[in-house]
Structures are given as structure tokens and as C-alpha cells.
Amino acid sequence: MRSKNEHKERLIRDKAMEMIVKEGFDGMGMQKLAKAANVSPATIYIYFKNREDLLNHLYNEVQNTFSEVALKGFSPDLSFEDGLWLQWQNRLRFINEFPYQYQFYEQFRNSPLINHSDVQLIMDFKTNMKLFLMNALKNGEIKKMEPEVFWSLAYGPFYSLIKFHLQEKTMMGRHFKLSPAILKTVFKQVIKSLQ
Amino acid sequence: MRSKNEHKERLIRDKAMEMIVKEGFDGMGMQKLAKAANVSPATIYIYFKNREDLLNHLYNEVQNTFSEVALKGFSPDLSFEDGLWLQWQNRLRFINEFPYQYQFYEQFRNSPLINHSDVQLIMDFKTNMKLFLMNALKNGEIKKMEPEVFWSLAYGPFYSLIKFHLQEKTMMGRHFKLSPAILKTVFKQVIKSLQ
DNA sequence: ATCATAAGTGAATGAACATTCATTTAAATT
DNA sequence: AATTTAAATGAATGTTCATTCACTTATGAT
């Protein structure tokens, strides 16, 4: 036999994501993608069933990368303030280190494609977050509230801040500039709103 | 001469938005759109220069609808808490009354198309918000902070809450269900974080 | 060295695409 | 009623699209 060239699949995935971020979903055509990745169009179909399958694989990969980065150094036993701050830092790190993945994710999440894709949940991530929230409640570090209220207060301002800084941009390549002082300021106010 | 049939343009715009929300940008093709609106493809080109022009018109229309709804009953002289609460209510009303426009906006905003479109700013809206913020600062209703910090804290949780409730859904048609009690709870905590 | 097998290919296919154009239709003006 | 003019059209154009297929190539196993 002959084994698959992993490098080739990586290249296809990366170029696909880059094209989507830069030109939108329409901009990522199979033949254009083939040219960009220096393979034959038919080769793409060895690695992916079709265009939709490729998109779903990309989405799932991003979810995996995200939950890996987000859980780095994290434990549900951290104090609430430390744990949430670590989450913010990890999420910022994700955006900085994988800007294409982040932008692709945001685009995909806001498109109707998401309805047709069979999203695989990242269980590890979910259980960690649930435990973390339960501990914070038990220790009286935050007041009792609905989960949706917690998520909105704890992460809403963070992502708003990110979007605000992404406005000017196309920050691709160079490093994403967000003042740590401002991030910390917002964080302190958020902690206040959760108590 | 013969005058343009305004009803026809409305229908084209509405169907276009509906298609984009339901099937994504790729899903909105000119010939498909023509069929959906019961006109000839060529007719669309009487009202819009081309596909991109149509998309830009849709985007601008949404911006106008939004700022009109958002300013309803609003004045920079309102107390900070009343003014911000009215903003939240107006924004929720916009989402409820124009769900297609809202979803189209979110999709467009997160796509690279936004870079190519010449977005026309809604000055009226911007100046109102600026005055409102200045008054709140002057009266000591909120502490001094960077504009981006203010926006993140004041609206981040609101939109997070909306997205959270939009998860389950395709809420198109029927009314968008978000408990007023929960909205108020989050609002109160947000006010706390701004003081 | 040979074989078996899956990776990899370039060209081809038919469908869908945005846009145009020669023509017809309807309404306002005369 | 006749004239004018722009709205409105259906069919056509040339392009680009996702996908397939008959074929070639590389590689691990024998």
C-alpha cells in the first residue's frame, strides 16, 4: 500500500481556513483550494467526502484546539477569581495564537451552515466548566444565578472587548494588540458584577 | 414614462435577506432570488447595480432600521440607568420585530464582505450615544473609563444573553422568548459593574 | 524484484452562477 | 388616441462551480 501524506491534509485544511477568513465561504472553492494547496482537486476528495464534510472537519478541529488551549493550567478547584482570569487569558491566547481558527469559528458560528453540521461536543471542557461554577457557588464566591446569567456576565464583556479591538484591523499575521491594563480593568468590574 | 414598482423592490430585498439568513450568502443566488420574488433576473438589475450592490443596500437598510428603533424614546438627558435600560429594551425590540434583519446583520458583520462594503455611518445615533455617555460621566453615575471598557461592560452581557437564547432556536416567525426577569437581573448586575 | 493497494492525478461533466441584451409592456405625458 | 420612456422580461452568454473517473504513481509487504 501507500500511506496518506499527513502534511498534505494539513496544508489543505490550513489553506481552506485561510481562504474562508480572507474571502468568505464563497471564496473557498474546491478548485481554487486545490491550486492554493498544490494538489489536484480530486486529492481533496481522498481526505474529505465533499465540501461540506471539509467545513465540518475544520469546525470540529477548531473546537478541539480551543478546548485544549482553554483548559491549559485550568482546574475546577482554582479560586473563582483565579479560574476566571485564567480562562480569559487562555481565550486571549487562543485568539492570538490561532487567529485564523478564531475568525473562522466566529464566521461559522454566525452562519446557517452550523445547523447542518453535526457538531461534536467537547465533553471534557463542559464538565470542567460545570464543576468550576458549582465550586464557586458552594464557596459563596459568586451569588446564586441562572447559568445563562453567569455566562453572559462572565464572558460577554470579554468578547465584546475582543470584537471592539478587531474592528480596525485585519490583524492577521502581526500580533493582536489589546492592552493588558484594559483587560484587567474590565475583569475587575466583571468580578464585581458577579458578586 | 413608467414608474418603478416599489412593492417589487421591497419583495426583492425581503426575499434576499430571508435567503441569506436561511441558507447563507452562497444560498442567495440572483436567479434563485428572482424566482423567489417572482420577477425576472434582469429586473433585479434595474434596482441594484449588481449582487454586491444589493448586499450593501441590505446592510445599510438594517443599520437605518436599527438606529431608528434604538433611538425611539431615547434622549441623552435621561438618567444613566433609565437610558441604558431603554437601550436594552429597544435593542431587544429590534431583534424581536426584525429577526431577519438582526440575523443578517450578525452574519454580515462577521464576514469578510464587510471590508469591501462602503458602510455609511449613522451619525444621529453616534452623537446621541456620545452625549449620553458624557452626561453620565459628568453626573458621576458611572466611573471614568475608556469608551471600549464602557461598551464592553454595558452591552457585552446583553448580546451574550441574546446569543445564548438564540442557540436552541431558529426562532424565525414565532416570538423570541427571553424572560424579562432574567434580562432585568443581568441589567442590575451590569449597572453595578459600571459604578 | 515484484506485487498489491491506496494515494494521487488532469481532464471532463453537467449544473449553477452573475450578468447582459433584444424585445415587449405599461404608464405617464401630449 | 398617440407618443414617449423607462420598467420589465425570458432567453442566452460565458464563466465558475463541485464532483467524478479512468488512469498513473509511489510505497509497504511479500
Image (tube, coloured by chain):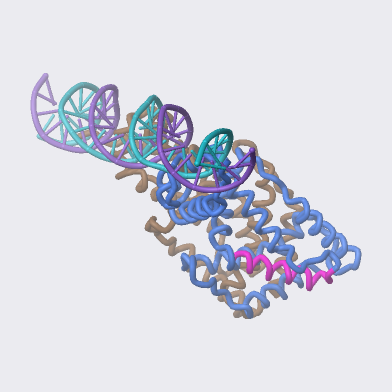
Chain colours: A brown, B blue, C purple, D cyan
Seen from the viewer's position, the closer of residues B68 and B79 is: B68
Q: Is B190 a magenta residue?
A: no
> How many numbered marks does the figure carry?
0
Point out residue C13 in the picture as x, y percentages from the top left corner.
Answer: 23, 32
Q: Residue at x 60, y 36 (%)?
A: A173
Q: Quadrant of the N terminus of chain B?
A: top right
Vertical comparison of B2 with B133: above or below: above
Point out residue B15 in the picture as x, y percentages from the top left corner.
Answer: 48, 54
What is the magenta range? B78-95
Seen from the viewer's position, the closer of residues B193 and B78 is: B78
Q: Is B90 a magenta residue?
A: yes
Q: Is residue B51 visible?
A: yes
Point out residue B185 in the picture as x, y percentages from the top left corner.
Answer: 67, 77
Q: Is residue A66 visible?
A: no
Query: Which quarter of the figure has residue A146?
Result: bottom right
Q: Residue at x 64, y 62 (%)?
A: A156
Seen from the viewer's position, the closer of residues B180 and B153 is: B180
Viewed as shown, does residue A98 lie left or right of A191? left
Q: Residue at x 80, y 58 (%)?
A: B128
| Magenta stretch prevailing secondary structure | helix
Q: Residue at x 40, y 47 (%)?
A: B32
Q: Quadrant of the C terminus of chain B?
A: bottom right
Viewed as shown, does residue B90 lie left or right of C6? right
Vertical comparison of A175 with B166: above or below: above
Point out residue C24 in the picture as x, y percentages from the top left corner.
Answer: 41, 38
Seen from the viewer's position, the closer of residues A109 and A64 is: A109
